[in-house]
Amino acid sequence: MESALHAHSFASDLSCSKCGEQFEIGNPQYFSTCCDKPLVVNYSKEIQLDKRELIGRENSMWRYTEMLPLMNEKNKVSLGEGMTPILPIQSYARKYGFDQLFVKDEGLNPTGSFKSRGMSMAVSKAKEFGVKECVVPTAGNAGGAMSAYCAAAGMKSTVIMPRHTPKPFQEECRLFGSELILVDGLIDRCGELAASIQKETGAFNMSTLKEPYRLEGKKTIGYEIAEQMNWELPDVIVYPTGGGTGLIGIWKAFHEMMTLGWLKNQRLPRMVVVQSLNCSPMVHFVNGNENHESYGESKANGLAVPKAFGKDLIKNVVHESKGSAIAVSEDNILKTAQELSRSEGISFSPEGGATMAGLLELVALGEVSKSEKILLINTGNASKYMDHFL
Ligand SMILES: Cc1ncc(COP(=O)(O)O)c(C=O)c1O
Ligand SMILES: [Zn+2]
């Protein structure tokens, strides 16, 4: 109990994900200046933490507080994110003949998507550094999440979003008091504007993987998968990939838990990247054929990321885990999200639907077997996408 009350972060330093050069953890950081690549947070390997200490801790992602980089608990900005349920997919699995099919339902997070995790961590860190203003380029969900957490922290926030993003994503940002800027084009164009606002105003820029803290929040999905599945990991995890933070984070968490001794004698899951045929740069990159044609919009707007800053890390995760990368059609994404929602009573976003559509294709290709233990990540719920379904 003592240690749970006085738990402190084991974070030790930051390093360049390419060359390993170290960066100071005590100052606000963005990305590595040596190689122009994402920075990653490292944790002391000397300190012991028994996983039994988790029992009875708060029911949020902050139960893994030693493995998060917040130094002072008073800076924590939390709205109850994390510890989303892992549910069996039942009728749909019976219909298609799967033995052990599960979904981690991230749609139950405070702003309806897994983006809450990253923003809870990154806004907390911004508060710890005395930041007064944040800016983010977003495909939709990250903007709503940042707006909510900045509201909770009493910070000013500016969100930059593609103009074609469905209205509920826009309204959510305004609801939480953000300034919303709409831009013609995809998230890469929004990123250019965010960088210039950062330069002009000094706002902290939360652009995907161009700062190291959101990744730490999102990795808690990986810790939860292990804990909630009683430390017996699935064989396959299917992840709808845009910038790749969730995928990279889950993989980082598995490695950290191995170091902590929490995953004894476990084979790590094969990690599957799913994208839309309309925008599938990561599928091409991972499979070794870059294709500059594949950069359009998607109704699964979280997947419409033409240039992922963490692309090397995404590729590593798929290759190291012996996973796969696959693209599915827009029609298939929407149809599957709707069918799954109807058969299970679980609200699937198009991105969540994409995971099932991708899984069925991999089964047809013989890359995944229906008898394996499979976990889909439903990264958000359907509520902000209703116009696509009605
Ligand atoms: C619902 C949803 N799923 C998936 C993604 C892609 O996330 P990542 O950047 O972790 O690949 C996003 C990002 O906007 C999203 O909003
Ligand atoms: Zn470097």
Image (cartoon, grey):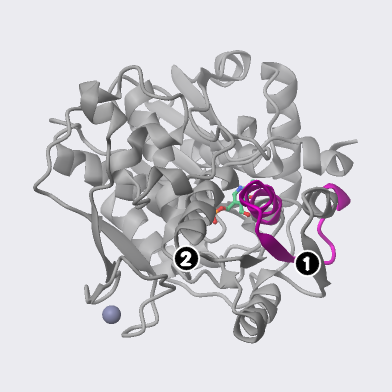
Q: Is mark 1 on a helix, strand or loop?
A: strand
> Residue under circle 1?
162
- Residue in the picture at 72% in, 70% down: 186
> Residue under circle 2?
209
Q: How many marks?
A: 2
- Residue in the picture at 30% in, 18% down: 55
- Residue in the picture at 12% in, 43% down: 47
Q: Do the residues labelled 1 and 2 touch (CB within 8 Å)?
A: no
What residue range appears in magenta? 143-168
Residue 386, how many percent across, how many down? 84, 38
Residue 377 is left or right of residue 2, and the answer is: right
Which of disc 2 and disc 1 is earlier in sequence? Answer: 1
Residue type indicated by callout 1: Pro
Q: Which of 48 and 282 is in front in this view?
A: 48
Residue type indicated by callout 2: Leu
Ligand 1 within 8 Å, label 1 CB: no
Residue 49 is left or right of residue 273, and the answer is: left
The answer to which image quadrant residue 342 occupies is: top right
Residue 220, how many percent across, how many down? 40, 40
- Location of the C terminus by quadrant is top right
Q: What element carries label 2?
A: loop
Residue 14 is left or right of residue 325, and the answer is: left
Residue 133 is left or right of residue 325, and the answer is: right
Q: Which of 62 and 217 is in front in this view?
A: 62
Residue 154 colored in magenta in the image: yes
Against 324, residue 360 (above or below) is above
For residue 328, which numbered disc appears in the image?
none
Few, some or many residues within 10 Å of mark 2 (<14, 14–19, 20+):
many
Q: How far apart are marks 1 and 2 (CA)?
A: 19 Å
Residue 24, how many percent across, how many down? 28, 71
**Which residue is at the far left?**
46
